[in-house]
Image: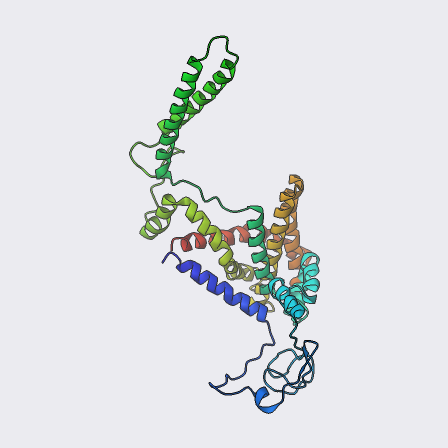
């Protein structure tokens, strides 16, 4: 069952991506029986291609007479192509979702998030990229960027129970080097100019051996699997499921568990949305005008922006941007963005928006992240 959580996460994410990319307007028709020809092939003669494009008057998917740019019966585009250039365009569009919607959505997400949220809730859906599509794009972009710049969890962490073995081996190697360097020094004449260099090497190896020996002396000698650094060893929670399935695995292979934690954070990032909605609802539960759907749109657009901001700051730091600028941006931009999105998205007063921004940034965010982290840790146990 070790891949059970990965399979669920991948399947769910794939379903969400498919729904987001497919989008509205992909109407369904009854499936044809085996061997039955399509209505187009049965009732009309297919027109020839004109420079790689169809010159059709009927929908090539269901045979309905075309009136506008899309079939009003099944939703397929009226204008179809069969050129390699258009195919490459579809690849870019499908992978990056860069079209007119994107350039209308991103500026508003950055500078006018509240108005974007309110307009989308009020029904302007075709004009903007849907929140879930933008959120998924930002998550996948974040994964790709972090892989490119090397911002990943370390996987070469030794399990605590193996630490003593590794230190003993390192001490043996240092002692062997120490004997070799000492023999080399003893074999040199007193006036040999190389004695100073060899003496420096001997001093360095000696200090290293002393440091390793000091660490070895502080290791537990009773075979325990943890290193007591604070005077009290953590013995478990007393809950068998947590101690046997979670804590034990973290002790045995922390590198693997960190890797699974990072992988699951991408696959199950969508869980941040349902986790956050109840907390946002609590801030508006007495205002019946706002429903769970409104909160879902607010949360999803907000998470998409935060992901894109995190990506931008990570890339800027990698390119050498000043650390104070990165830190100030990470501190002040998120609450400012939340304030603007709350104020205009929910049409609040300044005081109401400020109060809810304070609650979001100082309480809700940490509670949601804590719940999400514990869910990821639990998923990593399977």
List x then y, in percent, for residue 53.
Answer: 68, 77
- The residue depicted at 51 percent of the width and 52 percent of the height is 369
**Image quarter for residue 48?**
bottom right
Q: Is residue 162 visible?
A: yes
Pick the front one: 381 or 95: 95
List x then y, in percent, for residue 30.
Answer: 51, 84
- Judge from the rendering whether residue 178 lies leftward or rightward of residue 302; answer left or right: left
Q: Is residue 42 above or below residue 163?
A: below
- Considering every residue shown, the one lying at the far bottom of the view is 43
- Judge from the rendering whether residue 91 lies leftward or rightward of residue 206; answer left or right: right
List x then y, in percent, for residue 106.
Answer: 68, 60
Q: Is residue 189 above or below residue 81?
A: above
Q: How many marks?
A: 0
Q: Quarter holding the N terminus?
A: bottom left
Q: Is residue 52 above or below residue 148?
A: below
Q: Quarter holding the C terminus?
A: bottom left
Q: Is residue 287 visible?
A: no
List x then y, in percent, for residue 322.
Answer: 67, 40
Pick the front one: 37 or 348: 37
- The residue depicted at 59 percent of the width and 54 percent of the height is 307
- Report the coloring of the rendering: rainbow
Pick the front one: 315 or 169: 169
- The residue depicted at 51 percent of the width and 15 percent of the height is 194
**Image quarter for residue 220?**
top left
- Judge from the rendering whether residue 314 lies leftward or rightward of residue 103; answer left or right: left
- Considering every residue shown, the one lying at the far left of the view is 222
Q: Is residue 179 above or below residue 86?
A: above
- Judge from the rendering whether residue 355 lies leftward or rightward of residue 376; answer left or right: right
């Amino acid at each position: 069952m070790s891949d059970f959580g990965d399979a669920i996460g991948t399947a769910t994410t794939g379903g969400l991506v498919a729904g987001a990319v497919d989008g509205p307007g992909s109407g369904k028709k009854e499936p044809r029986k085996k061997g039955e020809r399509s209505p187009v092939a049965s009732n009309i003669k297919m027109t020839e291609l004109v420079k790689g494009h169809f010159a059709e008057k009927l929908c090539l998917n269901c045979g309905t007479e075309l009136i506008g740019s899309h079939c009003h019966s099944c939703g397929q585009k009226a204008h179809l192509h069969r050129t390699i250039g258009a195919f490459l365009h579809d690849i870019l569009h499908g992978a990056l979702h860069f079209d007119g919607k994107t350039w209308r959505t991103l500026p508003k997400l950055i500078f006018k998030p509240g108005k974007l949220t309110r307009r989308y809730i009020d029904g302007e859906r075709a004009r903007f990229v849907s929140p879930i599509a933008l959120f998924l794009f930002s998550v996948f972009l974040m994964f790709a960027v972090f892989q490119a710049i090397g911002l990943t969890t370390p996987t070469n962490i030794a399990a605590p129970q193996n630490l003593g073995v590794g230190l003993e081996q390192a001490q043996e190697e240092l002692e062997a080097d120490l004997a070799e360097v000492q023999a080399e020094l003893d074999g040199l004449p007193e006036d040999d100019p190389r004695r100073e260099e060899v003496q420096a090497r001997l001093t360095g190896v000696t200090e290293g051996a002393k440091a390793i020996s000091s660490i070895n002396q502080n290791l537990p000698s009773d075979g325990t699997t943890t290193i007591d650094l604070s005077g009290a060893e953590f013995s478990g929670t007393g809950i068998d499921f947590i101690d046997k399935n979670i804590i034990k695995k973290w002790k045995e292979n922390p590198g693997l568990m960190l890797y699974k934690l990072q992988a699951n954070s991408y696959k199950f990032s969508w869980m941040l949305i349902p986790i956050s909605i109840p907390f946002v609802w609590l801030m508006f539960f007495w205002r019946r005008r706002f429903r769970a759907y409104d909160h879902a749109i607010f949360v999803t657009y907000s998470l998409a922006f935060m992901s894109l901001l995190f990506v931008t700051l990570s890339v800027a730091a990698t390119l050498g941007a000043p650390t104070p600028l990165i830190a100030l941006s990470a501190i002040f931009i998120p609450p400012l963005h939340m304030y603007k999105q709350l104020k205009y998205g929910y049409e609040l007063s300044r005081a109401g928006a400020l109060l809810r921004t304070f609650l979001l940034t100082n309480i809700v965010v940490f509670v949601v992240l804590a719940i999400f982290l514990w869910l990821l840790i639990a998923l990593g146990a399977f």
